[in-house]
Image (spheres, rainbow, N blue to C red):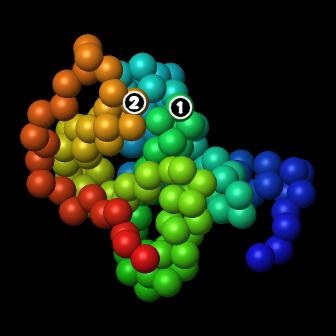
Amino acid sequence: MKAIDGTEALARSRALRRSATDAERILWRELRNRRLDGFKFRRQVWIGPFIADFACVEAKLVVEADGSQHGENREYDVGRDAYLRSEGYRVIRVWNNEVTGNLPGVLEAIRCALVERVPSPSQACGLGPSLSLGEREA
């Protein structure tokens, strides 16, 4: 994999932010500024050789909003997820149509993943909706 210098990495991250999908914009509106239970998320974050859609460094959680192109890139995603897991991150994937059609359920699933990673007595996680959130196994 080609090494990328800081200038190129910043330019690519900015380009991805400008060309965000509708689902990414919707999700970012809910995750930014510590709006989800006080957890700090960043978007289009470089982690090693990869860019994560959304990352909470404190909880070591990556959230990927996937469209139909991810069905074609399964091998790439499996390798990418394996790398992120090796760095201590948990990766959850949500389909774009889940974000646009069931945002409360997606946010609850993310909240549950955060609480599992950074437990707090003041935060409780009930049984959330059944989403097709994926943690792809290698």
Q: Position of residue 137 (x, y in %)?
A: 37, 72
Are the two marked residues, 2 and 1, in contact with CB atoms closer than 8 angstroms?
Answer: yes
Q: Position of residue 94 (x, y in %)?
A: 33, 58
Q: Position of residue 30 (x, y in %)?
A: 38, 32
Q: Which mark is residue 118?
A: 2
State the residue at coordinates (25%, 44%).
109
Q: Earlier in the sequence, mark 2 or mark 1?
A: 1
Q: Mark yes or no: residue 111 visible.
A: yes
**Which of the 4 quarters of the picture holds residue 49?**
bottom right
When the figure is inspected, residue 17 is found, relative to residue 56, above or below; the finding is: below
When the figure is inspected, residue 45 is found, relative to residue 58, above or below; the finding is: below
Residue nearer the viewer, 17 or 135: 135
Q: Exactly how many numbered labels are in the figure?
A: 2
Q: Which residue is mark 1?
A: 58
State the residue at coordinates (77%, 76%).
1
From this viewpoint, which residue is outermost toward the top? 122
Q: Position of residue 117 (x, y in %)?
A: 39, 37
Left or right of 4, for residue 34: left
Q: Mark yes or no: residue 103 visible.
A: no
Q: Tell me the amino acid under the disc marked 1.
A: Glu
